[in-house]
Image (cartoon, grey):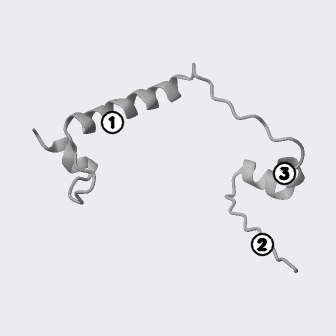
Amino acid sequence: GAAISTVLTFAQTGSHDSYFFENPDKIISGNPIVPEIDITNEKVIKRHVIAAIIQSYFHRMKIDKNNKNNDLLSVLVTSH
C-alpha cells in the first residue's frame, strides 16, 4: 500500500527559527544531542523550589482539585 506523510512546521520570526527553517538539514541530520540539565543553574533551582513550596501548600490544605472553584488566585487569598 501507499502511504502519505505530511509535516507541519510552526516557526516564529526569531533568528533561531529562521536559521533552521532555511537550513533544515542542520537540525534533522546526524545523531541527536543527549539532553542535559545544569543542576547548578540558579534559575532552574529557584523554579523547582517554588514549585515544591506550592505543591506542599496544596497538599497541606487538602485542596480539592476536582472543585472548579479552586483556581490558584482564589485559593491563595482564602484564609484557612
Q: Position of residue 58 (x, y in %)?
A: 26, 39
Disc 2 to disc 3, C-alpha distance: 16 Å
**Where 4 sits versus 73, above or below?**
below
Task: Identify the mark nearer the N-term, 2 or 3.
Answer: 2
Q: Secondary structure at mark 2?
A: loop
Q: Position of residue 56 (x, y in %)?
A: 30, 32
Q: Position of residue 25 (x, y in %)?
A: 89, 52
Which quadrant, please, contains the N terminus? bottom right
Mark 2 sits on what residue? 6
| Amino acid type, label 1 | Gln
Task: Identify the mark nearer the N-term, 2 or 1.
Answer: 2
Residue at x 82% of width, y 77% of height: 4
Q: Quadrant of residue 38?
A: top right
Q: Secondary structure at mark 3?
A: helix
Disc 3 to disc 1, C-alpha distance: 38 Å
Q: Secondary structure at mark 1?
A: helix
Which residue is nearer to you in this view: 49 or 23?
A: 49
| Amino acid type, label 3 | Ile
| Residue sticking out furthest to the front | 1
Disc 2 to disc 1, C-alpha distance: 40 Å
Q: Position of residue 2 (x, y in %)?
A: 87, 80
Numbered label tally: 3
Query: In the displayed structure, does residue 42 sit left or right of residue 20?
Result: left
Mark 3 sits on what residue? 28
Residue at x 33% of width, y 36% of height: 55
Report crowding for label 3: few under 14, some 14 to 19, many 20 or more residues within 10 A (C-alpha): few
Query: In the displayed structure, does residue 68 sit left or right of residue 35?
Result: left
Which quadrant, please, contains the C terminus? top left
Report crowding for label 2: few under 14, some 14 to 19, many 20 or more residues within 10 A (C-alpha): few
